[in-house]
Amino acid sequence: MVYPHAYRTEHSETQTSNNAYGDYFLGSQSNQIKIQPQLLKILQTIDSMKEKLIENLGKAIKIKSIASDVHYRAEVKKMVTFMEDWLKELGMKYEVFNIGFYYVEGKKIRLPPVILATLGNDPNKKTLCAYGHLDVPHAEPSEWDTDPWNLTVKDGFLYGNGAGCGKGPLMCWLHALLVCNDQIFSFICGLGG
């Protein structure tokens, strides 16, 4: 009997004449995946811009946009302006909506605004809709190993208040538009309460 495929396992050598299994095994051992040329170009562009992208996220992290605390209202407005500047730079049409009032620390104050923005208007293309938020929770310095208001790169990870939730994903969407700006993109972002 002829065994066309021989494979070493942890405990013994296994021989099989099953060609499908042999193909599967070889495929499962490969660490390389095929990347489409367009995706490869995008990934190379992102790699070439890595330092700038991290710097942009750092600028967003520095803004203490804590919407649930009246003492940070000016910072919340600063974050809205930061976002508007990005939308303008990307050539997006946008509108800022005031959506009412709420009570914080016994005071009636205006809810942070919601920003609706869009890029492109081709009905023959698919539309992607994304949601993000600009505010972050309180950051107790005693609970952080790094400064929560300064983006820190440590062991290949990014640390900062909002880096993983809120500002980080939001900046990823903006950077995706920066790199791939020929797609229709509808964008909704707002601040929670």
Image (cartoon, rainbow, N blue to C red):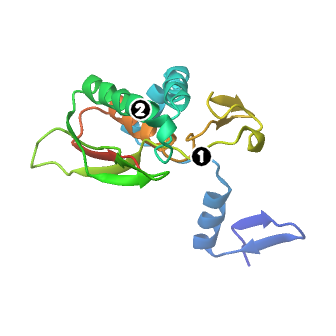
Q: Which of 20 and 101 is in front in this view?
A: 101
Percent of width and height locating residue 168: 51, 40
Q: Can residue 141 be seen in this view?
A: yes
Q: Nearer the viewer, mark 1 or mark 2?
A: 2
Which mark is first along the chain, 2 or 1? 1
Within-10-Å neighbours for mark 2: few <14, some 14–19, many 20+: many
Q: Mark 1 points at which residue?
A: 32
Left or right of 5, for residue 133: left
Q: Residue at x 63, y 76 (%)?
A: 18
Find the residue positioned furthest to the front. Answer: 106
Find the residue positioned furthest to the bottom. Answer: 1
> Which secondary structure, mark 1?
loop
Q: Name the residue under label 2.
A: 79
> Which secondary structure, mark 2?
helix
Within-10-Å neighbours for mark 1: few <14, some 14–19, many 20+: few
Percent of width and height locating residue 21: 63, 72
Q: Is residue 162 above or below residue 102?
A: above
Q: Is residue 30 above or below residue 134?
A: below
Q: Is residue 19 above or below residue 29?
A: below
Q: What residue type is labelled 2?
A: Met
The picture quadrant where one finds residue 82 is: top left
Q: Which residue is drawn at 72% across and 38% down?
A: 141
Q: Residue at x 57, y 39 (%)?
A: 163
Figure quadrant of the N terminus = bottom right
Q: Residue at x 33, y 34 (%)?
A: 177
Q: What residue type is labelled 1?
A: Gln
Q: In this view, does 39 lie above or below 89?
A: below
In the picture, the disc for residue 81 is: none
Q: Which of 110 and 47 is in front in this view?
A: 110
> Looking at the image, do the residues carrying marks 1 and 2 touch, with CB atoms under 8 Å apart?
no
